[in-house]
Image: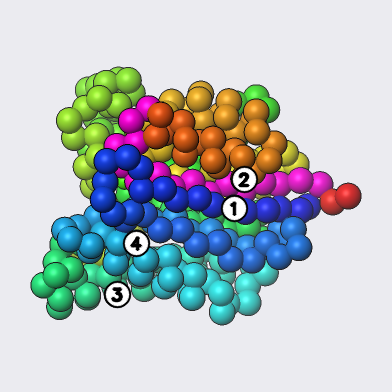
Amino acid sequence: MKAFAMGKSDTGLVRELNEDSFLISGFENDSPHGFCILADGMGGHNAGEVASAMATEIVSNELLHSDMQGDEEKIVAQIMASLDYANNEIYHKSVTNSQNAGMGTTAVVFYLDGETAYIANIGDSRAYLIEKNGITQLTSDHSIVQKLVESGAITPEEARNHPERNIITKALGTEPTEEYDIYEFEVREGDRILLCSDGLTDMLYDEDIKNIVLSQPDPEEALTALVEKAKENGGRDNITVVLIGISKED
Ligand code: CA
């Protein structure tokens, strides 16, 4: 298997700051070994920026220096430990620096170990699997509207316009301890995995995301097209997208 990963972040049309952050590591010479982290920060002044940058850097540092190829248990434990460490550091900074008070961030981590992929998340940044036959949301949002949808109180369409649609129920750095969701699956030739912040998914339907990714074989163009479409539709928030592609060895 071969893999690539590429990302793009844009402030959008309304916000002054870009509080999203992403980081890609590995995948050298199309190697199917590497990881990506995307974080969407929140907090007054530039605290959201601080939180999301801390999350991507800390998680990356914790994952980089671990030799765990082929060891599922170790990989899962290390991803969780890296998020715990980031949570701790962000929380500590937010309670000891008044200008960072209350800051926090979402995080979605994609880790590829050959044909096995791992995804961990907290908050409402998402991972999608895009194949020829469709688009599947791999993560579940930790948000008020997600809970309302699951309980049947509102429909997914109503969730899109709900006044509390951007309120998340969990984040890195807002509580002394946190729990994350983790998913594991086997990748296949032709798979595209998209990580994104809610600045994309608030502006685009899943179907539009799928159509853009499938109609643009060049990943750079696909990322640009996603960001441009989100801006065309209002660009109300920061937009960050990371695209991972899987292909067969030549
Ligand atoms: Ca956002």
* Residue at the disc numbered 1: 6
Q: Which residue is mark 4?
A: 52
Q: Earlier in the sequence, mark 4 or mark 3?
A: 4
Give the residue at mark 3: 89
Q: Please provide the residue range marked out in magenta.
A: 233-248
Q: Say which element carries label 2.
A: helix
Neighbor class of circle 2 (other Cα within 10 Å; few <14, some 14-19, many 20+) is some
Q: Is residue 240 magenta?
A: yes
Labels 2 and 3: the sequence-earlier one: 3
Q: How is the image coloured?
A: rainbow
Q: CA distance from mark 4 to mark 2?
A: 23 Å
**Label 3 near label 4: C-beta < 8 Å?**
no
Q: CA distance from mark 2 to mark 1?
A: 7 Å
x 36%, y 48%: residue: 11
- Mark 3, secondary structure of its residue: helix
Cα–Cα gap, marks 2 and 3: 33 Å
Q: Residues within 10 Å of mark 4 (few under 14, many from 20)?
A: many
Q: Earlier in the sequence, mark 1 or mark 4?
A: 1
Task: Identify the amino acid type marked 4.
Answer: Ser
Q: From the image, tell me which residue sits under label 2.
A: 220
**Residue 36 in the image: x percent, y percent?**
53, 58
Residue 250 percent coordinates (x, y):
88, 50
